[in-house]
Image (tube, rainbow, N blue to C red):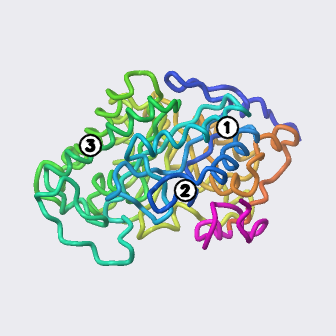
Amino acid sequence: MYLNIENIFRPLQIGPATAMNRLMRSATCEAAGDARGFPLLEPMKRIYRDLARGGIGLIVTGHVFVHPNGRASARQIGFATQEQAAAWEPILQAARNESAAPIFVQLNYAGRQGYTHGLVPAKNDKRERFPPPGTPFAEFYDRQIESVIKAFEDAARRAVQVGFDGVQLHLAHGFLLSESLSYHTNKRRDQWGGESRENRRRFALAVVNRVREALGGKLALSVKMNGSDFLPPDGIEPEEAVENARLLARAGVQLIEVSSSMWESLLGAARQVSGPQDEAYLLPLAREVARAVDVAVATVGGYRTVPVMLRALSEGLDMISLSRPLIREPDLPKQFQRNPCHEARCTSCDQCFGIPEGAVRCMLDHPQPVD
């Protein structure tokens, strides 16, 4: 069987950044932060060195928190101070010693899905600039919303200073920006939410605009967004997602990665893949977005084989985004290039999502920490 593998290995311009090919590493939490939110250098250098050496065209980091009250997990890495951002410099260098693939940092604030040490979120005090961890968007005061917008802006400036090639904003999976967009989680009765889609978009678009201004055209701007919350009747459905994508592109976003789901519907975002028939399970959502915008669109969701990836590209998508397969095989792009019939070895067991200790890794191949 002849496979036109060249279509996967063409470069792609994304604002000022150039992806080396059409395969991108989707943001994957490394679980490699210490108690202060600083990256553990040796595991992180290994992860990013292996990804770069393996031939991926674009790397997106795991989500980093822009303020400690927006931390999503105990081992999430921070980007809330200049010192935390500067700690990425040797990690970036380790990757760039191996490849010219651009590296985007994914900025996030957890919102209602924040890390609370297992406790009930504390009562929100309007005198505080940031609400306690785990506070839902519905309970944010105006002053706190502005503080979070400023936190994203400041983090974007740090990304420029440290030398990232782009920023991706996390607008998916029920975290704060995603939470604000969806009527399922945002039933506020003011200018920041409720039944009005315009109101629900106000916060996310404010973050996008401020981040774009902070980047000043020096770095690429991307978002990861839900093509569906899979939470009818109040969650975002594809028609609303397409509207969101159009507005994001109009606001200057240069790459849109289409994912899905919130905490209550996580099976939509990471399903079992036992064969080609199960691959590309979010492609219909990404295809609708790609048809509606003129910027690059990436599709994530169970890609394991070259023929399915080529089909997605032939249907108008610009990039294939991979997470779990690259945990087990960071050299997967080079394996595909050598042998287009290779199938990713990832079994979709999802054990990599709940690693008890050490950084993210395939638990089938490395049950014990490797660093």
Give me the C-alpha separation between circle 1 and circle 2. 17 Å
Measured in 3D between alpha carbons, the distance from the residue under mark 3 to the one under mark 2, in whole angstroms, is 22 Å
- Residue 95 numbered tag: 1
Verify whether residue 359 appears in magenta: yes
Mark 1 against mark 2, which lies toward the viewer? 1
Q: Is residue 145 left or right of residue 120?
A: left
In the picture, measured across the screen, residue 13 lies left or right of residue 225, that is right
What residue type is disc 3 on?
Ile
Left or right of 24? Residue 177 is left
Q: Position of residue 288 (x, y in %)?
A: 47, 42
> Are there few (<14), some (14-19), or many (20+) residues within 10 Å of tag 1?
many
The residue closer to the viewer here, 132 or 309, is 132
Q: Earlier in the sequence, mark 3 or mark 1?
A: 1
Q: Relative to 65, does residue 337 appear above or below in the rendering?
A: above
Spot the residue most to the bottom. 119
The magenta-colored residue range is 349-371
